[in-house]
Amino acid sequence: MTRVIRGGNSAPSSRRGRPRRRPSTRNCAIYERVRLDGESPEKVAADCGLSRQRIREIVAQVESWLGRHATHSLAEKMRARATARFDTLWVEAMAGFARSRQQRQIKKERIRKAAADGETAAAETVSEVTVREQNGDPRFLNIALRVVEREDRTWTQAENVEQTPAVAGTADLGAEIADGRTRARAPGSSHIPIDERFPHLPAGLCDLAQLACGWSRSGLVPVAIEFEQRCAEAFRSLGFEVQELGQGCGRVADCLAIAPQDRFAVIIDAKVRRQGYTLGTDDRQFCEYAIRHTRELTLSGIERVYFAVVGHGFRPDDLDKLADFMAGTPIRSVIFIEAEALMRLVDESIAHRREFRLADFDRLLFGNKIIGY
């Protein structure tokens, strides 16, 4: 069964040892300039009146402090900004690699003259098109690897990592691809094939959880776009009429899932995150989506509108913050949906297609909550 985890603050875990002194405002600014803004240590050293070696020491100290203090308020704020920046860089690097793998067409034109019966015939232009397969530029992968390493340094040393049940229930990042079927580690068990865990799930949705973590088998389409498309297909499989909006359409949500007969709809935004989703500054953007799309849906006869974020790993605190921010909008409820939970919902809806009704899904969405696997 799909688990529903309501928002709320989890109890802090016990500390081991005395925490190190928090970095100064100056040192935090130096770290962000070097790691997030990409400025060279030489330039930052010249601006601060320090040596290049000292700048590197400060960056390493702040990075180490972030990794060892998961629950400190300053660390959470800095980590949110760093994660958002690193994820953006990683997505851009992988998108660049995908573009570098696309086939290249080389078109050549030449003029051919032919003689007939001693007279010169009219010139003929001949076009030749050559298609070359590309292996991809490994420089993009090197950039993505460096970004992953830098982001991991802010997480892997953490002494007080607070795991919510939703995070603990997601698929292992070390998923295996075997015989064209994704194998993921279920919580507390050995590797179990997806087709055994979700026997009725369409094959095209078997990699939904891996895409949410940034893993893609094709590599031909940016992972963020591929994940948006998969989420749209998942809601279509549930029986919704889905309008895909997505990237390139301005400041809009990724898609709208509409149930005309039951007179409700879901505004959906899909987020690809390796380390779990962090709200950051998305609240204002989500609020803009909610107001714009709710106005459009109301004109078409929709009475109830929900806002859903689909991804990997959510925090109850972020749910509470977004719900409070959305309080002034027409949105009925805010829901965070784990990718694996969405897979489970689709699987169960197909397994019990005769009994399944979107009205039941309407009741599931009511109330601010995290829907976890």
Image (tube, helix red, strand yellow):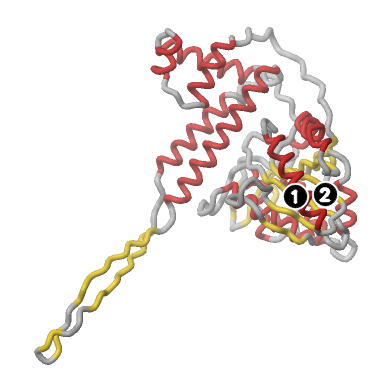
Q: Is residue 31 visible?
A: yes
| Residue at x-position 63% and y-position 51% | 246
In the picture, the quarter occupied by the C terminus is top right
Nearer to us of marks 1 and 2 is 1
| Residue at x-position 11% and y-position 88% | 119
Relative to 219, 288 lies left or right: right
Relative to 239, 88 lies left or right: left
Please say if 141 is above or below 100.
Answer: above
Relative to 34, 351 lies left or right: right
| Residue at x-position 72% and y-position 46% | 339
| Residue at x-position 83% and y-position 43% | 330
Q: Which mark is residue 305?
A: 2
Q: Which mark is residue 160?
A: none
Q: Mark 1 highlights which residue?
A: 293
* Callout 2 secondary element: strand
Q: Nearer the viewer, residue 17 or 222?
A: 222
Q: Nearer the viewer, residue 357 or 37?
A: 37
Q: Position of residue 23 (x, y in %)?
A: 59, 11
Please say if 135 is above or below 187.
Answer: below
